[in-house]
Image (tube, helix red, strand yellow):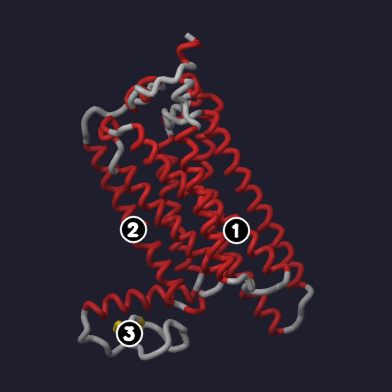
Amino acid sequence: MATESNTCDYSHNVTFFYNLVAKKISVGWNTRDYIVIGLGLTVCVIVLLANLLVMVAIFMNRRFHFPIYYLLGNMAAADLFAGIAYTNLMLNTGPWTRTLTKQQWYVRGALIDISLTASVANLLAVAVERHQTIITMQLHSNMPKRRVVLLIVCIWAIGIIMGLVPTFWNCECDLEDCSTVAPLYSRRFLVFWAILNLLTFFIMVAVYARIFIYVRYQSENTSQHTSKMRQQAIVNLMKTISMVLGAFVICWTPGLVTLLLDGLLGKGSHASHYEKYCLVIAECNSLVNPIIYSLRDDEMRKTFKWILCCLCRRGAPQQREHSLVRRSTSIPEGNLDCDLKSGETMC
């Protein structure tokens, strides 16, 4: 029996692995399935549009052309990618799972793995950038744009690598090592992946705690008005980023703990009973960040209004009497008219 379980047999299909770990695949569609997929796809569309709005806002507003906002824009790109991953998951779940080849199943999981890894790596990069900047009491770092681009490329390279790992580190050659949550994944890989991400969460929380302690100490020992205003701007930006980090940790920790328990205990963890709830919570995280930006950042909120105003006024070109954006906003310079002239958007 042991010899058989350690023999590589790549002829097994996806259904075989689901039956092996006693994970049920729906045979037909029911009302609950339609509701879940309908709500899931609706949330995915909102996630895609909201994060696309964040990316466009950072691109259009020159006040956001700093390393920290480029990284936050890349975070929005990771959330947008997560929306694509969840959309693909919704369109390949339930009874549709039976029709998937193993390659398609691995792609389905890899998309989610890539989005999570890119988000974690991006948050870690933000934490390091904020630490180096705030220790010198600067609002923005002097990191060259070329270095920021290289950092973003490295973040996505790491995400892609981690997404491809399960293709090679799976349980096809050791059937007793199959996960109950992701039946083709190796339980040992899930333990490694969950511990790695949870450890990264702990490091980021520790870094931000140190930053807040440092900023609070500096503010208590500074009396100049200009310095106070500068520190307040730093603190406000730090609070926004910390809320993004907190939301990410809260939304993803249940799922990672579930994977960890599944990897350690297997069927004894009963992880398949509550994995879908953890996935829903994780999906909501991709929608939370645009809400945080809207509530916390006045400049970002005004930029959102400006973009939506331009979209509405382009749909009704005869109504151009008013603008929802003050002239003090730096996006972009020129007449407050929503037109495309020489490749430059002006509103």
Quarter of the figure with residue 143: bottom right
Question: Which residue is found at the position 42% from the left and 76% from the top?
Answer: 60
Q: Is residue 138 left or right of residue 253?
A: right
The residue that disc 3 covers is 342
> Identity of the amino acid at label 3?
Ser
- The x, y position of residue 309, in whole percent, is 32, 78
- The x, y position of residue 288, in whole percent, is 45, 57
> Identity of the amino acid at label 1?
Ala
In the image, residue 161 sits, relative to residue 48, either above or below, namely above
Location of the C terminus by quadrant is bottom left
Find out whether the residues at labels 3 and 1 contact each other: C-beta distance under 8 Å. Answer: no
Quarter of the figure with residue 199: top right
Quarter of the figure with residue 304: bottom left
Task: Give me the disc on residue 125.
Answer: 1
Task: Give me the disc on residue 46.
Answer: 2
Question: Which residue is found at the position 44% from the left and 24% from the top?
Answer: 172
* Direction top: furthest residue: 1
| Mark in front: 3 vs 1 | 3
Q: Disc 1 on helix, strand or loop?
A: helix
Which sits earlier in the primary sequence, circle 3 or circle 1?
A: 1
| Mark in front: 1 vs 2 | 1
Question: 307 and 59: which one is in front?
Answer: 59
Which sits earlier in the primary sequence, circle 1 or circle 2?
A: 2
